[in-house]
Amino acid sequence: MTDQDNTNLWVREAEIKYIASKEKFFKTQLDNALKKYQDPLVVGNKLSELLKNCEIEAVKLVTPRAVQKWASPKTVNKWREIIKDEQMLAELREIGKSIANTLRPLAGNTFTQWICQVLNLTFKDKKLPLECVTSGNIKKKLTKSLVLKAKATESGTRDYKPDIDIIVINKKTKTPIVILSAKTTLAERVMQTINWHRYLERLPDDLRNIKLYLITAWDTFESGTNRERVQELDGVYVCNEDVKEYGNIKLFSKIINDLVELI
C-alpha cells in the first residue's frame, strides 16, 4: 500500500468517525429533551431553542474536521492550537459568520455590476440601441410603479418592492424592456422571481409587456424542481458553461439574441 493509499484510508476513517460523532451528539440532545419534557410536541415547540443550545458544542465538533480538511500542512498545527482555546474557538465562529454575511451580499452586488458591464460592452460592440442600468430615474419610476400593495392587517400595511437588479432600456424609445433579476445562487429564492413574474402579468399593458429574465451564476440546472419551475419565466441565463440547457434555460451569451428580438 502506497503512502497515498494510507492517507486516503486515514481520511475515510476520520470521516466515518466524524459522521458517527455528529449523529450521536444530536441524537443525545434530542433524547435528553424528550426525557426532560416527556411530551414530544412540547419538545417540538422548543426545537429552535434546542438547536441554539447545541451551537457551541456543534462548533467544537465540526471545526477540527474543517481544519483537517482545509488547513495546509504548514498551518494545520497552528490551527489545532488555536481551536484548543475555547475563547478563540468561539471568536472564530463569530469571525466566520461575519465573513460569510459580508461575502454573500458582496458577491451578489459584484455579480450584478459585472453582468451590467458585460452587457453594455456587448451592446456597444454590436451597435445595439440598448443599455443596462442599476440606478437612475427610469429604475426609480419603474420600481415605484411595480410596488405591490399588501392587504391591510392589524399591524398596518407592508409594501413589497419588485425584484429588480438591472433594467435593460431601449435607448431609442427611452423605455424599459427587460427586468433582470441577478442571483449568484438560487437556493430557495427562485420563487421570489417567479412570484414577481406572475404579478407583472396582472399589470396594465404598458408594464405587462416588460419581460423578466433571471440570471444566475452557479446553478447549472442539471435536475430538480427549479429546472421546471423557472420555465414560466421569460428567460433564464446561466453564467456557467456547465449549464444543462433546457427550455428557456440557456447559456448567458444567448441573452443577446433574445434581447435583439425584443427590439
Image: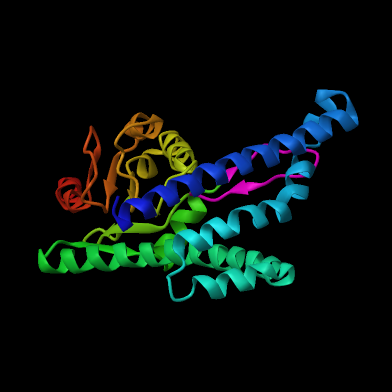
Q: Nearer the viewer, residue 167 or 206?
A: 167
Q: Position of residue 152 (x, y in %)?
A: 72, 38
Residue drawn 89% across the image and 32% down it: 36
Please state the extent of the stretch shown in magenta in the rendering: 148-162
Taking the magenta stretch, the answer to whether it contains residue 249 is no
Residue drawn 72% across the image and 56% down it: 56
Taking the magenta stretch, the answer to whether it contains residue 154 is yes
Position above or below: 69 against 243: below
Q: Residue at the far front: name it.
A: 1
Quarter of the image for residue 230 reads top left
Specify the principal SS of the magenta part. Answer: loop
Q: Nearer the viewer, residue 211 or 235?
A: 235
Q: Position of residue 204 (x, y in %)?
A: 42, 39
**Left or right placement of residue 175 versus residue 77 in this view:** left
**Scheme by which the image is coloured:** rainbow
Residue drawn 20% across the image and 46% down it: 262
Q: Position of residue 215 (x, y in %)?
A: 33, 50
